[in-house]
Image (cartoon, helix red, strand yellow):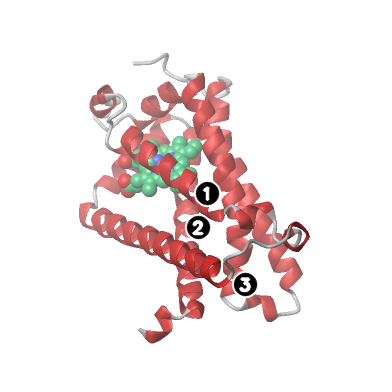
Amino acid sequence: MQFLKSSLGRKYLMALTGLGLVLFLISHLAANLLVFAGPDAFNAYGHGLRQYPAFLLIARIGLGITFLVHVITGISLRLENSKARPVAYAANATVAASLASRTMIQTGILVFVFLVFHLAHYTLFLVDAGYADLRDSMGRHDTYTMVTTAFAQPLVAGSYILAMLVLGFHLTHGVPSLFQSLGLSTSTVWPTIEKIGRLLAILLVLAFLSIPAAIWLQLIPGRGGY
Ligand code: HEM
């Protein structure tokens, strides 16, 4: 417990929860890319998951706790850093710290705002109550029609694309730095690991971004609304 209270312990916790969130993002991306395979594959995935409500509940609680711990440790480490250094660095001293690393709190808050909207949009159906009743010919929730109808609207697709860019910026610092906090930076292969981390973040975001972009550009057939 004492270890978790120390700043080294909290850095570990930050890295472990960050890793958990990245693994969630990879699995969420894999599921969402099924939209390119058509309505049947996309709707079957969501329907399949709902057949295991206990698993879904545990996964959601685990994800929620992981997210909360990540946010709380992130804020507490940042507050501690600014207490230890009440006067900001002179401009030339900040050159080494990238813009992404200096704006982690701000980009993190923006990702949080996106997440609140995203859950209201696609999970709680608060933005359009009609999404809740969408059914395909097999009686499954028609997630395909929901997503393609939403992203056909330029404002919705544009906001998701912007949010993905902010997430990408957060991850270009977050992914390499989680490897560093887990102790990999002492290794001689660190420069390669750092590059792989950054590349992974960029690929993840480009793949996420391709979904609203492809639907908006009508590269994926929608169903003309519902
Ligand atoms: C193009 C991008 C994205 C699309 C098309 C998308 C699509 C979806 C859909 C359709 C759902 C509802 C799933 C269901 O209930 O069957 C969902 C849930 C969710 N999404 Fe996304 N998503 C995207 C990006 C993201 C990003 C970047 C994050 C995280 C920063 C995220 C986090 C979540 C979470 C936490 C849930 C709730 C999971 C649950 O209820 O179990 N999504 N998303």
Q: Where is residue 194 in the image (x, y as percent from the top left)?
A: 70, 65
Q: In which quarter of the image is ligand 1?
A: top left
Whichever of labels 2 and 1 marks the residue nearer the N terminus, that label is: 2
* Amino acid, disc 1: Gln
Quarter of the image where the N terminus is located: bottom left
Q: Looking at the rendered structure, which numbered label has been put on residue 22?
A: 2
Between 208 and 14, the one nearer to me in the picture? 14
Q: Where is residue 139 in the image (x, y as percent from the top left)?
A: 24, 29
The answer to whether marks 1 and 3 mark residues whose Cβ atoms lie closer than 8 Å is: no
State the SS at label 2: helix
Left or right: 203 with respect to 20? right
Residue at left offset 51%, top offset 79%: 8
Left or right: 50 with respect to 173? left
Q: Distance between the residues labelled 1 and 3?
A: 21 Å
Please identify, in this view, whether the residue under mark 1 or under mark 3 is nearer the observer.
1
Badge 1 is on which residue?
106
